[in-house]
Image: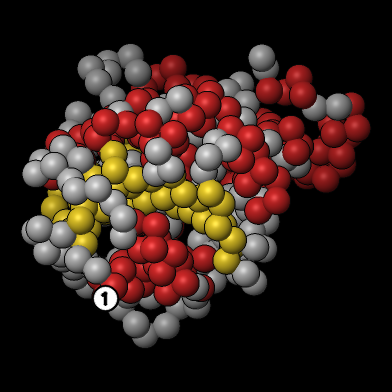
Amino acid sequence: MNNLSILSSQDVRELLDEYRHLLPVAGLLAGLALGYRFGRHSNSTGPRVIKAPVPATSNGYPSDYYDGGKQVATPYGDIRVYEFGPADGERLLFVHGISTPSPVFSKVIDRLQSLGKYRVALFDLFGRGYTDSPDVPHDDRLYVTQLLIVLRHLGWDRCSLVGYSLGGGIVADFASYFPQSIDKVVMIAPAGLLVESSLPAVRRIAKSPHVPLAVVSALQGLVRPRAHETKVQVGGDRRDLARVIDFQDRQHKGFLRSYLSTYRNAVIFDRWDVFERLARTELHAGDRCRAIWGSRDDIVDTQVVSANLVKALPACEVVIIDDVAHDVAASRPDDLADRIHAFLKGTTKQAK
């Protein structure tokens, strides 16, 4: 169904009144976008890829942010992957959210490694950090494929998954298809069951495939509130998350395209099918799924979305961390890590 059809006449009037001054610019961008769209594919032989910044230790996102960093070549461009920790440690694969790349987990991982023996892997999603941006829909199929590629590179047959925000929806989707490869699933403020009809009108328009991305880009501040996963201010620490975000915004030419395509296509809104499929697996039946929320999360709304999750996954316990919002990984990393560790410490022995 055309997403524009969900707008009421009152929605349209409000939009016209509020953004009337942008309509000439939007019309121009729409024309340019359509011309670009029909022109650029005429001689195409494969997905167009916007390259990520070249990794360097001097960047705002230092290439040695974690140990074991590598660029992994794929048909969709290079993926930045990290792997570190004791070789015989319990395997954990982390998947970040829609904006902040893998450094968002740094303090959580520091705490986890002080609590137990963990072999950790992380990667930057397509179009984030040091991972390239392919010109394909950034949907559930792309992200499940990305996880498969990363696991193949790591040589891991089995592990636990920890996903944050968008990453929570991605790990739920992956686990629903490949439960035999997963020990446990931790979803931190997971996307997937947000309610699209509750969005402001401009954000519903941004999801429509009939609105060119160039137009949405002109209104990006209304679609992409900045830095929901961290409120840290830029400082002198070379591992400062705000420096990473600023570097990505300024230097990754494919980030905005990947963000907007993800917003339109990935496991974010009303994806009951993903969680109902997960509910039919042994992961759900065996109490091997856990969700964690900050009590004041107004991005992946604590009350609304967690209630939806419980309906879809009634056996999945939801743990609430008091007095913190969506930036729980940055603001309360020790509390978050303690709860993850408490859930994982009974993990069954993993296959080698």
Q: Which residue is pictured at 24% across the width and 35% down the height?
A: 181
- Does residue 66 show up? yes
Is 59 situated left or right of 339 in this image?
left
Q: Nearer the viewer, residue 321 or 33?
A: 321
Q: Which residue is pictured at 28% across the width and 39% down the height?
A: 182
Quadrant assignment for the C terminus: top left
- Does residue 173 show up? no
Q: Position of residue 187 (x, y in %)?
A: 46, 49
In the image, is residue 239 above or below residue 66? below
In the image, is residue 219 above or below residue 275? below
Is 299 situated left or right of 337 in this image?
right
Q: Position of residue 210 (x, y in %)?
A: 61, 21
Report how many numbered discs are placed on residues in the image.
1
Q: Position of residue 124 (x, y in %)?
A: 30, 50
Q: Which residue is pictured at 19% across the width and 48% down the height?
A: 349
What amino acid type should be assigned to the residue bearing mark 1?
Answer: Ser
Residue under label 1: 114
Q: Which residue is pictured at 36% across the width and 63% down the height?
A: 341
In the image, is residue 194 above or below residue 130? above
The color scheme shown is secondary structure
Q: Nearer the viewer, residue 206 or 312?
A: 312
Question: Which quadrant of the view contains residue 207?
Answer: top right
Quadrant assignment for the N terminus: top right
Is 270 situated left or right of 116 in this image?
right
